[in-house]
Amino acid sequence: MTGFAAIVRRDLRLALRQGSDSTMVVMFFVLTCVLFPFGVGPEPNILARIAPGVIWVAALLASMLALERLFLADYEDGSLELLATAPPPLEFVVAAKILAHWLTTGLPLLIATPLLAILLNLPSEGFQVLIATLLLGTPTLSLIGAIGAALILGARRGGVLLSLLVLPLYIPVLIFGVGAVDAVIGGFPARTHVLVLSGILAVALPLAPFAAAAALRQALE
Amino acid sequence: MKLSRMLLPWAGGLTLLLGIAGLWFALFDSPPDYQQGETVRIMYVHVPAAWMSLFCYVVMAISAGVGLIWKHPVADVAAKGSAPIGAAFTIVTLISGAFWGKPMWGKWWVWDARLTAELVLLFLYLGYIALIHAFDDPKRGLKAGAVLALVGLINVPIIKFSVDWWTTMHQPASVVKMGGPAIDASMMVPLLLMAFAFKAYYIYVLLLRMRAEVTAGKVRALRLRQAHGAV
């Protein structure tokens, strides 16, 4: 467990000292959302109707932005090989790195979300459930994304390839995340959607580190 | 190689035979549907192609898994060969489905659970193909692809049961279900004939692709030896 905490602390410190990754992700998130009123017009009703979807899609794209660098920096400077030969199993290392990635990208998105919800005129009853679904959904995105990030190590044009691999797998999270918010705004309970989202998280949490670790081992061979 | 040479003409012949018989039954010797009229004949291409799109994926994922675990080279070749065929079947499914959807639902495309899941399947195939070709070392690409194929296997049951889990426009399964098929024999026969024709076609093309892949590997090895010998 100390190894786990140490890796999380190391990655967080690296992210903070090198700066910019988290702020860039949040800036991208905000700017993408702000583009929509220009694109579809400032009509409050239309904006309120599309707000959950826009915020979710923007959050999804933003969380993918920093994904490529999840393992790449460690792979290039060789520290990934040291981590792989370290006493804690590689699955643990991967889980720790995913947690650190979520703390530096997923969490800032959550903090920026209420502001964007106001800008896009989201009905106030949707606020709570939007935050709740993002809280459940963004860790899943980081988990699934880690598999893709591990697979593309050493590939040509890795960044473009990553989006091709990861985006199809993101679709279920998007569907149920937006579905929950739409249900609450429409006056229905969001329980089913939230339960499915939790279910996806519960499946991804143990399985994704295994798949990502398997992919990393091949990259290091 | 020897086995494949023996099987190849059989699979090809079977494809032709079953395909012609199936098409004959499908186009001329089966009744039009009482609701859908003649458009129901699209089913004889659409449904087998959809079955095959899933079947190819399962074969691809299993052989990729075998290649990953036991490092058997033939399994890798089979996985690599299955992907483009499966992608083609998926495209056929989506396009024939659009042709069927236009007269029946009034739309080429609806964002419905099964259609969306099938589209995701296409993206998984394309992602797999892109991934295995993205590395300078082809072995590494195959291994990375194998992990992706196994992860994407989650999608297969979602497609299969999407019509039961969600209320959709797409009709529920009527061939394989509890209490026997809910489809008349006059439609069942051409459907099954076409399904087996598609399967034989898959085996035929897969064997062709695998032979080509193995031969390409031999050519590469010969070239390398030549290059080394020349120095």
Image (spheres, grey):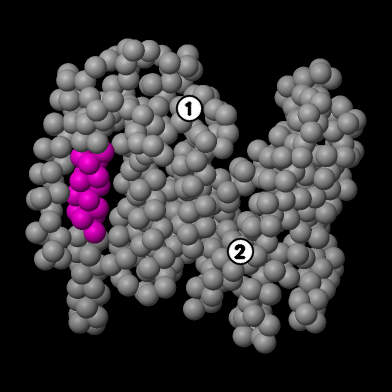
- Rendered residue at 84%/20% (across/down): A44
Element under disc 2: helix
Answer with left or right where residue A154 lies relative to residue A38: left
Asked if residue B201 lies in the magenta stretch, the reply is: yes
Amino acid of disc 1: His
Q: Position of residue B1 (x, y in %)?
A: 15, 65
Mark 2: few/some/many CA within 10 Å (<14, 14-19, 20+)? some
The residue beneath circle 1 is: B170
- Which quarter of the rendered picture does the N terminus of chain A lie within? bottom right
Q: Position of residue B75 (x, y in %)?
A: 32, 65
**What residue range appears in magenta?**
B195-210
Residue A76 showing in the rendered view: no
Eye-nearest disc, 1 or 2: 1
Observer-nearest of A142 and B21: B21
Q: Position of residue A86 (x, y in %)?
A: 66, 86
- The subunit letter for the residue under badge 1 reads B
What label sits on residue A207 in the rendered view? 2
Observer-nearest of B14 and A217: B14
Observer-nearest of B191 and A113: B191
Q: Splitting the image into 4 quarters, where does residue A212 fall?
A: bottom right
